[in-house]
Image (cartoon, helix red, strand yellow):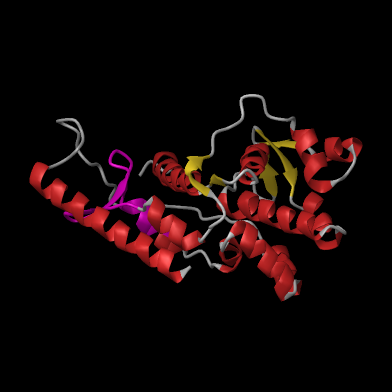
Amino acid sequence: MDESITQITEKNAVVRDWSLKIQREKGDSLVEGCVANLPEHTTVNVRKNNLEDLVRVWNQWDSDTRGIFTERYGDIAHLITIRVDEQLIQAMVRFWDPAYQCFTFNQEDMTPTIEEYAALLRIDNVQFGKIYVKEPKPLTFRKKLVRLTDMTDAWAEKQIKKKNEAVCIPWSSLRESILSHPDILKRVNLFALAIYGLVIFPRVLGHIEVAVFDFFERLKQGVNPVPTILAETFRSLSTCRRVGNG
């Protein structure tokens, strides 16, 4: 495991050095006349879901259950304990250039990479050449809920809500299943779903959006989630700049 991460890091360093060399030799990669427009200041309201329930569940699990989770979903569980630094987020948005899709610090450009995210999340049981693409005819949200939770159609229909134009379900609807479902794999899967919905792809506080269910269904087929998570980082940073008017 350590060896594979080291190889990824070394590869990423080579790519970074090559990119810096090309930028210095050939100049900007954007069309002529495009000018970077970094704001003088930013105001970002950092909101996040309350993750105390997830932390409590993780702490209650024994080493065998945690091992099953890590084997299936990598190191994403450590994300629930990370404290969000609001000043750091403001600084990141301040130096994010949506046109270049990178951070600009004086004369240097930096951007997160797939290799870095792969090393951070350490998700091994995926096909790295197979990324997530939404199914053309996915199952209905209700059917996904029934399959993931083993609950009834009537229960699933009752949980589905619409918040801020997003179709979703409350986190509280899944909490009890994670705590008490007789199938350990079901508990593990639902816990991973909660992390993806509340931490990695949050849209409505306290809820998990239908789009996350679509994504999660494909994870079980071994697709690589890293490019999608990286794309969400780019989208979120650019959205912060646009909504905050700099």
For image coordinates 67% across by 55% down, the residue present is: 192
The image quadrant where one finds the C terminus is top left
Using residue 85 as the reference point, say whether residue 198 is left or right of it: right
Q: Position of residue 8 (x, y in %)?
A: 37, 60
In this rendering, the count of numbered labels is: 0
Q: Is-magenta flag for residue 97?
A: yes
Q: Quadrant of residue 234?
A: top left
First to last magenta residue range: 89-111
Q: Is residue 41 visible?
A: no
Q: Position of residue 58 (x, y in %)?
A: 70, 69
For image coordinates 51% across by 61% down, the residue present is: 122
- The residue closer to the viewer here, 123 or 49, is 123
Q: Position of residue 237 (x, y in %)?
A: 42, 47
Q: Is-magenta flag for residue 90?
A: yes
- The residue closer to the viewer here, 179 or 100, is 179
Q: Quadrant of residue 76?
A: bottom right
Using residue 209 as the reference point, say whether residue 39 is left or right of it: left
Looking at this view, name the residue that lies furthest to the top. Answer: 137
- The residue closer to the viewer here, 83 or 87, is 83
